[in-house]
Amino acid sequence: QVQLVESGGGLAQPGGSLRLSCEASGMMFRIEAMGWYRQAPGKERELVAHTVIGGKTNYADSVKERFTISVNNAKNTTYLEMNSLKPEDTAVYYCNAQYYSRSLRPSDAWGQGTQVTVSS
């Protein structure tokens, strides 16, 4: 089982910045991809950013040029740098990891979510 622990959410003013972190721990063979999703009140969960380890990265159109996803492979940690924040970025942000278990079974895990609120 892999556990994801997120941190870094909070309150920011419009135009401000926040950095989210998500560390994966537990028994696994290898992480294949990590991503960030968000869910605003009354809306469905949506992709924010996703990166394949050693491969492609993609972003939701609404966050391109403002958010950056990165991964520290040695620490099994992904980060989401969020700049030029807007009130519509307000949501609970969830980390996701796609990995192979130690028995080489493809699996995925979700973090508990961290609240991001953008308001003046």
Image: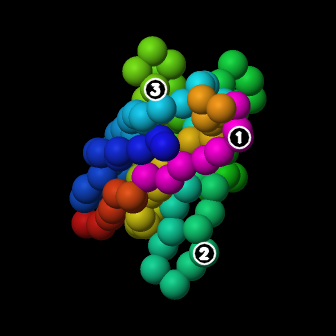
Is 75 in front, or is 21? 75
Hey, which residue is sitting farthest top in the picture? 74
Is 79 in front, or is 119? 79
Residue 90 visible in rendering: yes
Residue where numbered disc 1 is placed: 106
Return the disc, 2 or 3, that comes first in the chain's sequence: 2
Is 79 in front, or is 105? 105
Mark 1, mark 3: which one is toward the viewer?
A: 1
- Residue 74: horizontal and vertical position, in percent? 45, 15
Q: Is residue 11 above or below residue 27?
A: below
Three-letter code, disc 2? Glu
- Residue at mark 2 to residue at mark 3: CA–CA distance: 27 Å
**Residue 108 covered by magenta stretch:** yes
Which residue is located at x 46 percent, y 80 percent? 41
Residue where numbered disc 2 is placed: 44
Rendered image quadrant of residue 103: top right
Residue where numbered disc 3 is placed: 76
Residue 31 visible in rendering: no
Return the disc, 1 or 3, that comes first in the chain's sequence: 3
Element at label 2: loop
Mark 2, mark 3: which one is toward the viewer?
A: 3
- Residue 37: horizontal and vertical position, in percent? 55, 55
Q: Is residue 42 above or below residue 4?
A: below
- Residue at mark 2 to residue at mark 1: CA–CA distance: 25 Å
Q: Is residue 55 left or right of residue 120?
A: right
